[in-house]
Image (spheres, grey):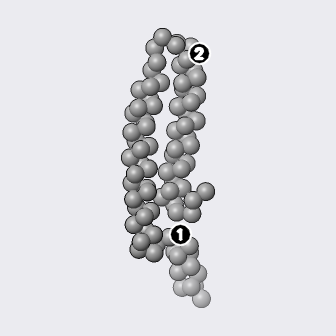
Amino acid sequence: MPENPRLRGFLIHFVIFLVVVTGLAILNLIRNPDNLWFLWVLGGWGIGVLAHGIVAYRRSRMDEAAGKTAKNKAAKKTSKKR
């Protein structure tokens, strides 16, 4: 699991997307193979997942460049408490 919360959020979103779309595809192909409606879900939600992935990747790269990784934030919090 990635340490960066942005990438972790994307990964969770992507796994849920895969599970749900796979389930809907199986359901669609069993119940009504003549009408492939799951492709609409795949396309619509897929665009959202793709956008989420692009934004998460870009912002995580910006965070790394600025030194704002999860470890740095945690280290700063613990050093302030001392």
> Is residue 49 something one can see in this rendering?
yes
Residue 44: where, in percent of width, then height? Answer: 39, 33
**What amino acid type is highlighted by mark number 2?**
Ile
> Is residue 77 something one can see in this rendering?
no
Tell me which corner region of the image, top left, top right, bottom left or bottom right, holds residue 41: top left
Residue 47: where, in percent of width, then height? Answer: 39, 39
Q: Which mark is residue 70?
A: 1
Regarding mark 2 in the picture, which secondary structure is present there? helix
* Up/down of 8 relative to 66, above or below: above
**What amino acid type is highlighted by mark number 1?**
Ala
Residue 4: where, in percent of width, then height? Answer: 52, 63
- The residue under the point 44% across, 25% down is 39
- The residue under the point 55% across, 48% down is 12
Q: Earlier in the sequence, mark 2 or mark 1?
A: 2
Q: Is residue 19 left or right of residue 58?
A: right
Q: How many other residues sit within 10 Å of disc 2, few (<14), some (14-19) or many (≥20)?
A: few
- Classify the position of the C terminus by image quarter: bottom right
Q: Give the farthest residue toward the bottom.
A: 82
* Up/down of 73 relative to 31, above or below: below
- Dot 2 corresponds to which residue? 30
Residue 53: where, in percent of width, then height? Answer: 44, 50
Tell me which corner region of the image, top left, top right, bottom left or bottom right, holds residue 16: top right
Give the distance between the C-alpha atoms of the residues marked 2 and 1, in whole angstroms. 44 Å
- The residue under the point 40% across, 42% down is 48
- The residue under the point 40% across, 51% down is 54
Q: Which mark is residue 11?
A: none
Q: How many other residues sit within 10 Å of disc 1, few (<14), some (14-19) or many (≥20)?
A: some
Camera-side residue of 75 and 62: 62
Pointer 2 with pointer 1, Cβ within 8 A: no
